[in-house]
Amino acid sequence: MARSNDEVAALLQEYADLISITGGDAFKARVYEKAARSVGGHHADVAALDLKGLQEIPNVGKSIARKVREYVDSGTVAAVEELRSRIPDGVRRLTAVPTLGPKKAMAVYEELGVSSVAELADAIRDERLRDLRGFGPKTEENILHGIELLRASGGRAHIDVAMELAEDIVRVLSAVPGCERCAHAGSLRRMRETIGDIDILAAAEESAPVMKAFTGLPYVTEVIGQGGTKTSVRTGRGLDVDLRVVPPDSWGAALQYFTGSKAHNIRTRERAVHQKLKLSEYGLFDVESGEKIVSGTEEEVYERLGLPWIPPTLREDRGEIEAGLRGDLPELVAEDDLRGDLHTHTDLTDGLAPLEEMAEAAAARGYAYYAITDHAPDLAMQRMTNERMLAQRERVRALDGTYPTKGRRGGLRLLHGTELNIGPEGEVDWPDDFLAGFDLCVASVHSHFRQSREQLTRRLVRACENPYVNIIGHPTTRLIGKRPAIDADLDAVFAACARTGTALEINAHPDRLDLRDEDILRARRHGVRFAVNSDAHAVPHLAHMRYGIGTARRGWLTGDDVINTWPERRLRSFLRKGG
Ligand code: DGT
Ligand code: CA
Ligand code: CA
Ligand code: ZN
């Protein structure tokens, strides 16, 4: 996705927030919010569009198009600056607290002078909030909970934000004369769901030119530390970045060291010690003679320790060393193994692009099959009806096989599905005879998140027992940094999935990554199958798959575990659920 689209989307969203905070027209705020989402999901780079091109983006009218041009041309928008100047930054930071919202943020600022998250927590502790109009003890409790969530995320960034930034840095530094290699390491290379800071590694005889290019990057706002081999910076993207420059012949040892995790490194160092060796970021050395044994590649380092090369996503000391010693490391699923996507939306519900555009983009990704799964009627705001669903099915059937798909014989096979809502009792939107018409059904929890553990568990188990439900979508419904997972007995749900032939989704959206790695490891032991899905609501979201695959790899999954790597016949047989 073009970076300018993200920037413009963030600006439009900020404008919408500012309108709400300052008590502006709620309708206008919503218009800007919708435009922000459309721009963020637009396939073409907005920086390259003229006013007319901009207005062809859904939800972008003339006045928004003008603001976008103004931003692209000058870097600022007068209307946004004007609103920004009317409220302190602290109030805007308050809106990051889940459940607080812009109106309440402004109210606590105006009534109590609260302008930071810490002051807000204090005010709640002193029970000062409950006397404000529109607040009460329950609101206080909710906000406090929101503050906890915000703090629990510890300022860690979502993986897509970190990945896009890291790839840009690696691209720039790789072009510096004398830079022989450059790559990201750390938690990002291990594909953790959130990233504390970005670690970049470069190999060069001379570090100075690389360091200089690094501190000169346009989004660097502050140099936190600078030395001969390491420089740390703060960026305007809310993330710090460490750069280490090592001599080219230390590359392998340094990459191994800075990829981590710390726990994994402790284990590899122990193995070295047992063999009278010393492992550091400079290489593997003989303790007695001090002689360097290997350092050029990770493979050599692991081999000398008696281990096969271990994929970074496994390096968490969760059994990978033992498995490596036994020669038992899994053949991890890869993005290239995917033959399709089984949970996607179109503009028939809350997606941004029409069916044709989504299918064309799916074909360009080289998929063999692709499922359209728009929302079902119980999500009332989506206004789904039987007629609309059946009309869509006809279009899907007409387009089936008509998109030539890259590198495969025959056109893209389109599956017609839906994303059902798992109701409070585990019921779904339609009766069996209507469900029978779909090629597949995803079923997800979209409401009643706070039921008791028993109720939530029963609900999910019932959904699995429905003969038409093939995949449980985003099974825990958590939103990273925003909403906790529902409190269900997941082991009972995993057992039900295995028993009924229902797959669990690994939702690849960087806000979700649900199931998460630890739950995948547990589910796998029950013999459950998985589907890694984008849940795309726009064309660029199809590319989120890489994060879902990263999560699946952290969960030790192989291609055989993931139903959307299977050939179409095997998939269709699974979708019949033993019937
Ligand atoms: P993060 O940044 O919190 O998402 O997680 P990491 O894993 O990227 O951690 P970070 O940035 O502190 O360090 C990057 C890697 O460098 C880490 O995974 C392992 C290595 N490392 C850092 N400090 C130590 C240490 O004290 N001992 C060992 N063995 N390795 C370290
Ligand atoms: Ca890091
Ligand atoms: Ca670091
Ligand atoms: Zn969905």
Image (cartoon, rainbow, N blue to C red):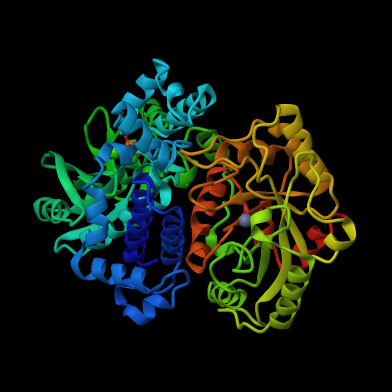
Quadrant of the image occupied by residue 565: bottom right
Farthest front residue?
Answer: 133
547 versus 228 height, above or below: below
Residue 357 in percent (x, y) is at 56, 76
The residue closer to the viewer here, 518 or 291, is 518
425 left or right, relative to 269? right
Specify whether residue 253 is in view: yes
Q: Is residue 271 above or below residue 89?
A: above
Q: Residue at x 44, y 36 (%)?
A: 100
Name the quadrant where ligand 2 sits: top left
Q: Position of residue 358 (x, y in %)?
A: 57, 72
- Point out residue 463 in the picture as x, y percentages from the top left corner: 79, 45
Please tell me in which quadrant of the rendered image residue 280 appears.
Answer: top left
- Between 359 and 554, the one nearer to me in the picture: 359
Q: Is residue 309 visible?
A: no
At horizontal 68% and vertical 53% (from top left) the residue drawn is 379
Q: Nearer the viewer, residue 1 or 499?
A: 1
Image quadrant where one finds the N terminus: bottom left
